[in-house]
Structure formats: structure tokens, C-alpha cells
Image (cartoon, rainbow, N blue to C red):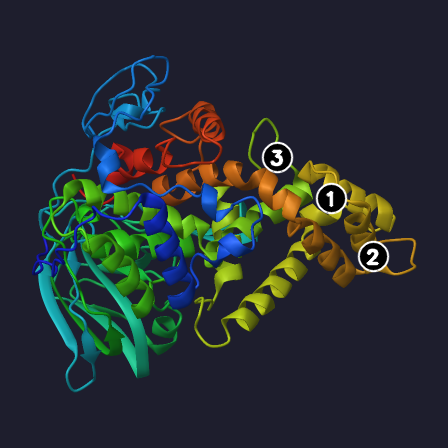
Amino acid sequence: MKAHKDNLTRRGIPCDGPSPQDIFNAALKHWRQRLGYCSIFATVPALLASHVPVVHSDEGKKPEVSVAGQGVRFRETPNLSRSNPALLKRQSEFLLPHQLGNLPLLTQLAGNDDCPGFFIPGGNYTAAAPYTASGDTTGANNTINNLSYCYYFSPDFCIPLYFYTTLGPDHIYTFTLTGRGANPQLQVSASSSTYRPAIYILDGRNGCPGDPGRWNGVIHSADAGGSIAFDRIEMNSLPLNVPLHLFVDSEGNGAGSSGPYSIRMQDVTIAPVVACPKSNAIECTDMFVRQHYLDFLNREGDAEGLAFWMNEIEVCGTDAACLEVKRINVSAAFFLSTEFQETGYLAYRIYKASYGNLPGSPVPIKRNEFQTSTQQLGQGVVVNQPGWEQVLENNKQSFVSDFVHQLRFALEFPTSMTPTAFVDQLFANAEITPTTAERADAINEFGMVSTTDDLPARARALRRVAENSTLMQAEFNRAFVLIQYFGYLRRNPNDFPDHDFQGYNFWLKKLNQFNGNFVDAEMVKAFITSGEYRQRFGP
């Protein structure tokens, strides 16, 4: 089912005029004053403002892009449906290097049996005035086949405790929960004597159809013609300010697997729906910006931040070249932001210092580890809101303390190690040579003891290494490329449709060739215009 919205107000401010550097300097000053999003430039020595790339609308007309393997310099229009069986390394075509040309795009969304399905309108729904809806799953698609409830020993290892089959046709309702009353409830009732509906809710931060690995842990199945509900306790367990997908499904696909139903939800506040009139939702500015908050900061955007970044794009009006430029710069700004650098990039560096790169891999962390870590580090953090620095600091201390308690860390660093050996191993894993003072400071966290069984001291020493400015500089480009895969494509670089790190290595080489200039390397542009990214949001 397609949702619609009124056209966004366009501002006819031209992009021509001041030089690119003038524009960047003014924007950087404005960002720092307004939201602090780009104050990372003051804290990362490797990223000097004079070297940060910002493109201008005029540059879209200039012959500035070198095609890999060719001497001719030219620029092409993005081709989103190009098919090529060979490994594509011509970034001027704006296809990711790994794409083999046969990756199917999502089919046209049609009806509320296709994610995101039906958007529940925003509002405050009470017991006296609840949200109500009705539907019939007869003839609908089957989206999710099974769910498993796991007991996790670590982010990438779990023991399945329960398995649920959900083979029947389903309807999907998408909403963002922003508040709850005293007695929140969500009830689904079968409207026929034979239908046996099952309901569950998936976390939608990973896009549609939601993440079966990050669901709320409850599935209810009704008797034929009966009713099922999420009670107050279960509703209170749902995360706030993230997209959620309610599935009206069934366990089997035979008799009683489909039929008419009704929904009733009370004592909840739902965020307003701002739908997109474009064929692909990511082409709408509000969706584009909102999705970046979800993909890179793991939260819904705050009102001030959303308005600021949307305006950065909307000032272009209908100037296509300007819009392209602004979308690239806004997209990259989320990686460069203080909030991401102090959460996602910190998690990356903690894994790097602790374990080095993964065996046979050029990266130190898997996406599932990264997601779990970033969510813990960023919990409740909104830069420039009152007290955000203390919230962030508390999160860092809690995360690193939990990290050094993990079995994997204990096996890598036995408590019998001396403080000197412990710290030297951290720096060796990080592949950097500390100054004499940096090494001494980390060792001195243990005082005068000869072992490293002091867990708080272990955490402090690990954090000193992870926050080392040389490490931040050395890993910056590598992390930038890896986060393109984690954020835009929601996968590891060697996951399907790739089978190795050839694509990752290609982009890292390009970024290094251009001294970290993501604009000249056209890395961000390639990812946000790729078929694999766009297929998350529509055709």
C-alpha cells in the first residue's frame, strides 16, 4: 500500500554564489553552534576542516571523476538498474563494486500485506478513544516464516529456546511508539469462527520487514475465532521512538490460517506519520534524514536535528544538482558527527584494541557486535540536549566495564598478565606505537600491583588505548568504509551478495587514494544511490 503526503515546502535559495570552502566554513560554524553535530572536527586531529570535502552544485557539471582503470575523466548520471555480470569497479556508474547485476529489487508495495504495510496514524489513543482497524489476510503474502527466541551468551552466539513458525499470510502495521499510559494494550480479534491469528512485533530499525533477531520476544496465537493481546507488561517492554512492525499472521498455512480480524490499541501515543509520495521512499527528504538517524545513531531523530538536516537539503528547492550534493554531505555528516564518533566509532576502536582484526579479515568487528555495542553506548544520548555529556560518559563507563567482564576478553587477557604485558598487548592489537607517556599512563591505571585482576583498572586502561588519538587517526578511513556497509546496506562487507572483502578493499583503496576525501572518491554517493540500498525502501 502506498502512503501519500503533501509536498514539502520548497525554499528557492540558489546553490550558486560563494565558493565551496566558504559554504563549508559557514555550515561548519552553524552546525557547531546549533547542534554540535560536527564538533568532531575539533576532537579528531586527523580531520582538519581545511581538508574536509564539501561539494558544490557547480561541481556536478565539471569533469572531475576518474573512472577506475581508465584515463578519461568524466561524470555519468546514476544508473540504478544497470546489469553487469562482472565485478563492477567503475564507481562513475554509481554501482557498488560487489554488485553482480542480478540482485532483485523489492517488488512494488501494494496493500498492507507488504512491509511497511499500513501506517497507524499518529495520535494519543485512550481507552475511551482507542485506535481501531480491521482487515482480512485472505490472499495476503507471507513475509516471515519463523521466529526463534534465543538465550544469548554473546552478541553472535545464542541458544534457541523456542521456535515459532509463522507460515500464514500476514498483514503489517507500522508505527512508532512515543509514549504509554497507565494500561497500554493491543488486541487482535478474529472476526470469523475458523481464523486463528498470531501476532508479534518486530523492531524496524533495520528496515522492512523488521528484524526477526531483534523482536520483542512475545508471540501470541489465538484459538479459532478468538482474541489475543499484548498486555500492559508486554506493551511496556516495547522500545520507544523506533519504528515497529505489528504482524497479524498465523502459525500455519492451511485451514484457519487467514481471515477477517479487528485491531484495538489503547493508552499509547503514536508518532505522526509523514508519508512519501515518491515511488521510492528514500527519495523524500524527511525519510532520507530520519533513516540516517536510525541507521547510524540507532534512534529517532530529535525535532531540532531533523529540522536542521532537512533544511540543509531543502534549501536547494528543485535544483537536482544541488540536491544531489546536499544529500551526500548530509549523509556523510552522520558518520562525522560527535554522536557517532563517540558511540559507533568508539565501539569499533574498543574491539580493535581488544582483539585486533577478525581472523582472515581486514576489520575488527562484526555488524551484530557493532549494533549491540553502539546501542548501549548511545542509549539516551542526544548531542546538545541538557546533560548529554554526562549520559554519554555514564554509558561509556558501563559499556567498558561490561566489556572487560566478558569471557572472550578474559581469555584474551588472563588476569595473570602483568600491567605492562596487558597494555602492550592492547597497543599491539591496535597496531599503533604509543608515546612513552601514553604507554605509562595506561600501565599506571593498575598502580603498583604485578597482575591485572583489577577489573576497573582493566576498563580504564582499555579505554585509554581505544581513545588514543593516533588510533583514531589510523583507523578512521577503515571505519568509514566499514560503516558504509553496516549503515547503508545493513550487513557485513563479506555477506551476500559479496563473498569476500573485495568490495571493502576497493573502497578503502579509493578513499586512501583521495586522502580521505569521500567526495572525490565518490564513496558515499555510490552507496546511497546503489540498488542494494534503495531496495530497502521501494522499487
Query: In the rendered view, would you say 11 is above or below 503?
Result: below
Q: Earlier in the sequence, mark 2 or mark 3?
A: 3
| Residue in the picture at 31% in, 14% down | 86
Q: Locate residue 369 relative to residue 119 in the image: left or right.
A: right
Q: Locate residue 444 relative to residue 98 in the image: left or right.
A: right
In terms of secondary structure, where does tag 2 sit? loop
| Residue in the picture at 65% in, 50% down | 466
Give how far apart the Cα atoms at labels 1 and 3 are: 12 Å
Query: In the rendered view, would you say 526 is above or below 309?
Result: above
Q: Which residue is mark 3?
A: 357
Q: Give coordinates of residue 177: x percent, y percent.
A: 29, 70
Give how far apart the Cα atoms at labels 2 and 1 are: 16 Å
In which image quadrant can residue 4 be found? bottom left
Q: Which residue is mark 1?
A: 426
Q: Residues within 10 Å of mark 2 (few under 14, many from 20)?
A: some
Q: Which residue is mark 2?
A: 453
